[in-house]
Amino acid sequence: MFSPLTPLDWKRRAVKYYPNKIAVIDGDKEFTYREFGKRADQLSAALLQAGIGQGDHVAVMLPNTHYMLECFYGICQLGAVMVPLNYRLSAGDLEYIIRHSDAKMLIVDEEFCPPIEQIVENLSLEEIIIVSVPGEKTSLKGIDYEDFLQHNLETVTLSEPDIDENQLLTLNYTSGTTSKPKGVMLTHRGNYLNAANFMYHLGVSYDDVYLHTLPMFHANGWGGVWALTAAGGTHVCLRKVDPPLILDLFEKKKITLLCGAPTVVNMLVNETKAKEIKMQTNPRMATAGAPPAAALIHKAQEILGLNMIHVYGLTETSPFILYCEWKKEFDGKTADEQAAIKARQGIELAFNGETKVVHQDGEEVAWNGEELGEIITRGNVVMSGYYKDPITTAAAIRDGWFHTGDLAVTHPDGFIEIRDRAKDLIISGGENISSTEVEGVLYKHPAVLETAVIAIPDEKWGEVAKAIIVLQPDSKVTEEEIIQFCRSELAHFKAPKAVEFVDALPKTATGKLQKFRLREMYWTGPKRVN
C-alpha cells in the first residue's frame, strides 16, 4: 500500500478527530476545525467552478489572516499550486512574479491592492478575488472573497485529486535582492517532511496555541501552516507585527509557541511593556533568518522568559535543515554560555537529509570550530529547482548538493555555526572578519538597539568593517567609545574602523537585514559583489 506524502491530509485528520476544537483565532473571529475545514472546502468548490484545477497556479497576497490559512488548504487540495506573494514588494516585482509564475488567478487583501492597481493592465489573470478590509477601498475589479465562497458544497463534487508527492504544492519566490526574484519549487513531499520536522523538533502538540508572527508567505510560515493543524493545535492570526499586541496576546490567548526573525525578538525585548508582563506560559520561540546574537537570546530568555530555539534554513530547503538541539548537559552552564550555544545553527533535523560544511574542493571541514567552509545540503526538503530557470538551478545544485552560500564552522560536537554569508564576509588586509561575530559583540553594549556590520572600501586594507547602529531610546555614545568597546572584546583587526548612527536599518518583510542596501551607499567607485 502506498499513500503519497502531503500535508493536506492533516486537515482531514484534524476535522475527523478535533471537529469542535478551536482551530483558528483571528481577532474577534474563531473557527473550529469543522468550520475551518468547511470554509477551505468551499474555497475549493468555488475555485473548481471558476476553472481552477490540478496543476493550475493561484497567486495569493494576504497577511496572516484566516483567509491565508484557508488558501493553503483550499487551493492545494485541488492539486493546484499556491503562489504566496510578499505584499511588501514593489509593483514591478509583483508584476514580474505574477507573470513569471503563470498564475491564472489572484486572491488579494484590499489593503494591498494599490500596487496591483498599477500593474493590472499588464497581467493576464482570469479572475481577481478581493478580501474586503474595513476602511479600505480599491478600484480593482474583482469578486468579493465571501461572495466567492457562497457555493453549495452539495452541488459540487470535490473528488480527491490524484496527487503525486513530487508534484508542486507551492511556488515560493525569493526576495530578489541582487537579481530578479526566483521561483522556488516546493513539493508535497518536501513540505510534508519539513512540517514533520517543525512538529517534532519544536515539540508541537494538541495543547499548543501558536501565534503567526512570521509571515505565512515566507516559506509557508516555515511549515507552521501545516504542523499546527497536524497536531490539532490552535492557530492565532496576526495581521502585522505589533509588539504591544503580541505581548497582550501572550497573556490573553496564553500563547505557547511562535516563530520570528531576530529583529522581531529584538522588538519584543525592547518593548516597554516587556518588563511588566507576567508570562504564564513561557512560550517557545523559534528564530532564524539571520544568525541571532547570543546577547539577544540571553535578553529574550531573561526579560520575557522565552524558551529560544534556533533553527536554520532557506526557502530553497522548505526551509529547515538545522536546529540547535538542547542537551541536558547544557543546563549546568551559565546563562551566557547557554545563550552562546543557542546562537549556533546546530545539527541536522530528523527528516530533512544530510547537511555539512565543506571546503571549495568538497572535502568536509575539520570539526574544530575553526576551519571555515560553505554549508551544503541534500535530501528530502531541497527544492526541485527554480521555476523556468534551469541555468540558475544547475548553479545552485551541483553534484547532488544544494549550495547555500553560507560560511560556517563545525564544532567538535558536530554543531554547525554560521560565521557569515559569503557575500557578507569582510576580507581586510587578507584577514577574514565575520560580520556576525562583530554584531554579536555590539549587541552586548547597553546603548545598542540594532546593528549591521558591513565592509566599506579602504585604500590601505582593501576593505574594513563599519558598524551601522540604531541606538536605544535616549542613549548617547560616541563612535570612539563603540570602537574601543569592540577592541576590548575582539582582536583589534576585527573591530570596526568606522561607526554610523542611524534611525532605522533596511529590512525585508520577514525582518532580515538588507546589508546589500547599506553596502550600495559605500561601493559607488570600486565594485564589490553583493
Image (cartoon, rainbow, N blue to C red):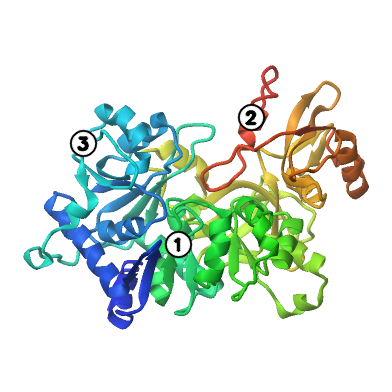
Picture disc at residue 529: 2
Q: Which of the two discs, 2 and 1, sits closer to the camera? A: 1
Residue at 70 percent across and 63 percent down: it is: 275
**In-front residue for pair 399/167:** 167
Tags 2 and 1 in contact by the CB under 8 Å rule? no
Whole-angstrom CA distance, mark 1 to mark 3, is: 33 Å
Q: Is residue 471 above or below residue 38?
A: above
Categorize mark 3 by other alpha carbons within 10 Å: few (<14), some (14-19), many (20+): few
Residue 59 place in picture, x, y as percent = 31, 45
Which of the 4 image quadrants contains residue 233?
bottom left
Q: Which of the two discs, 1 and 3, sits closer to the camera? A: 3
Which of the 4 image quadrants contains residue 230?
bottom left
First of labels 2, 1 by sequence position: 1
Picture disc at residue 223: 1
Residue at 53 percent across and 35 percent down: it is: 177
Whole-angstrom CA distance, mark 3 to mark 2, is: 43 Å
Q: Which residue is mark 3?
A: 141
Categorize mark 2 by other alpha carbons within 10 Å: few (<14), some (14-19), many (20+): few
Q: Say left or right for 333 vs 373.
A: right
Amino acid marked by disc 3? Lys
Q: Say left or right for 205 vs 310.
A: left
- SS class of the residue under badge 3? loop
**In-front residue for pair 105/87:** 87
Tags 1 and 3 in contact by the CB under 8 Å rule? no
Residue at 56 percent across and 70 percent down: it is: 251
First of labels 3, 2 by sequence position: 3
Quadrant, the C terminus: top right
Picture disc at residue 348: none
